Image (cartoon, rainbow, N blue to C red):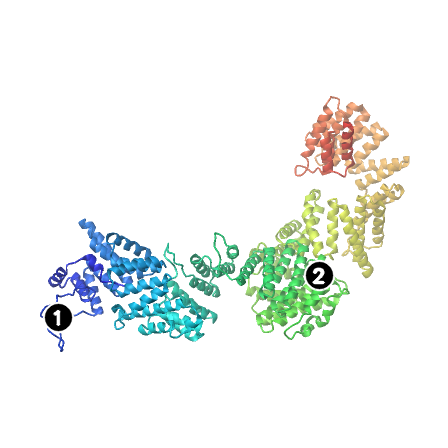
Amino acid sequence: MASHANSAHDHLDLDIQTLRQFVELFPDEGLSKVVTGYLSSGLSRYPLQAESSDAPDLSEGGVSLSQNVPLTQEDCLVLMTEGIEDAKNSPLAHALLGEFYLHLEEYESAVETTRKGLKLAAVEAKKTDLSFQRIRSALNSTLATALVYYQTPRNHPEAKAIFESILKRKPHFTAALIGIGLILEEEEEYADAVDFLEQALKQDPSNGRIGAEAAWCQALSGDYQTGLSRLQEYLEYPQLDASKPRGRELRAQTLFRIGVCMWELDSSKAARRDRKGPYAMFLAAIKANPNFAPAYTKLGIYYEDYNKDKKRARQCFQKAFELSPSEVEAAERLARLFANQGEWDIVEVISQRVVDSGKVKVAPGSKKKGVSWPYSALGVVQMNKQEYQKSIVSFLSALRISPDDYHSYIGLGESYHNSGRYNSAAKSFNYAEHPSDGVAIKKADSEGWFAKYMLANVNRELSEFNEAIAGYEEVLKERSQEFGVSIALVQTLVEKGWRCIETGFFGEAADSTTRAIEVAITITEYKPDAFNLWKAVGDALSSFTWVQERLGQYPASQVAKLLNSKSDIELDYDTHKDIDGIGAGVLGTIASEKSPTLTNVLRASILAHKRAIASCAHDIHAQAVAWYNLGWTEYRAHVCLEQEIGEGDKLTTYLRAAMRCFKRAIELEAGNPEFWNALGVITTTLNPKVAQHAFVRSLHLNERSVRTWTNLGTLYLLQNDSELAHQAFSRAQSTDPDYALAWVGEGMVALLFGDTTEALSHFTHAFELSDSSSLITKRQYAVSTFDHLVSSPSASSNITNLIQPLFALHQLSYQAPYDIPHKHLAALILERIGNHDAAIAALTAICATAEQDYEDSESLSALVRFAKAKNDLARNLLATSSFPEAVDNAETALELLSDFDAAANASIMTPDALAKTTLSARLTAGLAHYFLTSLDAAIPYFRTALEATGSNPDIICLLAEVLWAKGGEAEKDVAREQLFAAVDTHGRHVGVVTLLGAMAVEDEDQDTMKAVKDDLEALRTSSDLSVSDLARVEKVLEAISFVLGGEESEVDEARRGVMLKPWGHVGWMEMAGAGAAVEGETAFAAIMARETAGRSVPPGGSLDATGLAEAVVGTGLAADAQRGIVLAPWRETTWAALRECVASLG
């Protein structure tokens, strides 16, 4: 929009005569060539040569010999570019060439040339100390004008600053006024733009370009009527003459703007569809200038929105976009059309071209809004190409331009989600739903559900299942039949159930699975044949087999309803009945109570997976997966039902059915290593050679499969090849050190080599690594730990070593309630930690099961299990003072084992195990009779036990106590003889020596007391004595000292005990109980007993709660009595101490 009223030439204010003389004198100089080209281009108001007054008349023909005939634009450009090569350091040459580039609308070249000219001017100014203000102003004027159009609107701030600096010196400089007006127009500050353009128009009233631009800004400011009138007036101005190229462009632009004014003045459909209205103006604009892009855009909108001609609309948009990438609206509509057709490559090209045009981003501080859709479209295209990192960048760019773009937030969240950045995805979706910082997200009411759905997906990936389920359910309240959301809810509920099984929350797992079945029923009402639905149902039903304690929650009626739901395909459950015998006939029995619940669950799961196969008949990959899933379900039926009586015929049926399923899966997809691994697992027992081939094939496809290496090691283990098994398990461990079953395998190998310590280490590590769903890790860990504790007295005395095995067995009882051997093991551990009531409850149930098993099978193994359970039950009943029941169960155990030949049936029960079991039963029966005061009945049991053990000193002590309690002299003599014989045989046995000392005290046998006292004094210094044994020794020593030397001797003996072990509480307790001769010594001894006892509890010692309570209450203080009750509320002595304290107060 140049104006000759003011230009760079006016800034220079050069004398034309001087220029002409310079060209004449120095025609070969570079500057001369530049000046010649400039003056000959018609751009200057002065010609190269002055017009002669006697110029010839050429009206009737002829050729002028004058040099003032204008050169073509091409010739001028060639001449000036040649000259600039020779005048590289001339600021004037760059100023003139820059203005010529501006005239040619070569804005980039104009900017580069003028910037270089400014640098040269600065260099000359530094050399000469002159300002060169005029040439610098000329260069700045050209630069600023070029920057208005070059890379709009990026360079507008710089251009505006230059123009403002020029206006400070020349307030009415037309080019600067026009430039600022155009910049304000671009920034949509139309009122201010009108002011500047009107000022420029006053300087050059005849310039139709400036007037038309001012009228257009007036229209854009909202006054379309005035703008229309003025634009129509300017059509007659010479600058809009269609016979000239520049005039045609301006006329086309003005006609288009008149059409826009008419379009906006009457927005009714009738007015806009009128072909004599705006439509005619747009066509006229195109006729005036066929390359005027905005007119094509408006015509495209006309055809698309009002004429409903999408073909012509697309042609118009394509033409507009081809002519100018700045036609953003045409590009957007064109991109939408191609996106609806799935032509994403074309959408990418369009969007990228719009981004490259520089029209999408606004200058800093501009009030104009940027365009974000090209970046959003690029993000969508990149997501379709799975280029998620690029799509993240694109969506972020879109959001920087439009922070309220809902779809860009969704796209960004999806990109984060698909690239695994779940936390960032959650933040994006949350912000889309609940924006902060005062941002109002633009979205339709019907669109909000998708963000909730995607946020639920993110929570699902993060294993935040409760939040995910809540999100899905919230979406389903609005869109109850949205299949994608419903199936995601079912799958999440199933995944939550499995996670709960892995983490030990078995009740919650059953609840989650039941809820999944309920949701699945609602899906069958509108989409009953979805493959994912039936796969999820099959997995949900299978989860019940992992928490069999919760089989009572199995929703049989709902499952039957689900499997009997309608189908839109030809569904026949009998299609694959030949595999396992389960078909449509089973449907009627699934909800029946006649069949075992576990069997019904497995059959229902198998039918669900068969329906999944039918649902994907046209998808080979899905069919392969469906057969694979069915195979594992068949194998699960084989594993679970092998424990059920009466299912023996079905075991090989299920196993062979699983093998056929996996073979079918391999036929459909032979390159899947998981399928080969599964086939190897199934054929491990059926055909080891086939199993080995399958495992090797699986490892060939994926040599880093830790499961396959572990399964191969198990195969070698079953074939008694320990070395190969060890190599396979080691490879599995190196592949994934956190895979628990590989450690179990190594533990098994260690057991085969007889290294129980190493095996225990492996089993313990496997238990720590594994989740709660693994049964074998719990079993091996519990058994190995119990065997270690039995073989190691020091470890067995520490109850804390039994906590983890007990927890493992407790979980195992929930998952496999049929596992009687490990329930029995749990009862033994409960007995060891002193929880006899729980042990009795468990053993009672085990006895009932074992008895039923024995009655059904009458096998020797069932007999042995029943006898052992009865023996252990009797022992626990004895511990709870249930003496009659203890006698009955112990005698039953002895009766059951009375005719058992251990030598002939060593595989069932070894002679050593039989001897231990009968000894335990006899001792239990004898002790129970003793406590029932049936001494005559107790003695035979002890004597038999004594004979069986070869005069064991502990049994001798029991027998001596019974005989002594009977009271007869003969019995007492026999008791003494037995004890003296034990002393000769076993030396200083604590039980024997203390019992002899007690008998001597009661008989006042001083000779025996003196002899026993020597042995007791030797024993009290032994470091091997337990706390209870030391207390017995100290008690008997004090009694002997009292009998031999009176009370003073008793106190001296107690003091001697304290001197020997001042850190132990036993000596202090005995000293406090003996009665001190010095005043206050008793109280001090009681306090010291309390303090030393506090230091003897774990981990500082092995003192239990009862011993600590006894030491604490000895002080006679009410506070300590209360502490004793808290420590051991079952002890009568603690309550008695509190009662004495209360009595002393009242």
Q: Is residue 903 visible?
A: no
Per the image, the residue denoted by label 2 is 554
In the orientation shown, which residue stands out farthest toward the top? 1078
- In this view, 1055 is above or below 321: above
Instruction: Assign the N terminus to one quadrant of the image.
Output: bottom left
Residue nearest the viewer, comparing 11 with 354: 11
Residue 809 x, y percent position in the rendering: 70, 52
Distance between the alpha carbons at the discs numbered 1 and 2? 109 Å
Look at the numbered discs 1 and 2 and tell me whether their residues touch, using CB distance below 8 Å. no
Per the image, the residue denoted by label 1 is 66
Q: Secondary structure at mark 2?
A: loop
Residue 45 x, y percent position in the rendering: 18, 64
Residue 156 disc label: none
Residue 71 x, y percent position in the rendering: 19, 69
Query: 10 Å neighbourhood of mark 1: few (<14), some, or many (≥20)?
Result: few
Amino acid of disc 2: Tyr
Q: Is residue 79 visible?
A: yes
Q: Earlier in the sequence, mark 1 or mark 2?
A: 1
Residue 942's quadrant in the figure?
top right
Instruction: Assign the C terminus to one quadrant of the image.
Output: top right
Residue nearest the viewer, comparing 780 with 484: 484
Amino acid of disc 1: Ser
- What's the residue at 85%, 54% (across, down)? 899
Residue nearest the viewer, comparing 600 with 664: 600
Image position of 117 (left or right of 854)? left
Residue 484's quadrant in the figure?
bottom right
Q: Secondary structure at mark 1?
A: loop
Residue 1042 x, y percent position in the rendering: 80, 26
Image position of 738 (left or right of 11)? right
- What's the residue at 83%, 28% (across, down)? 1007
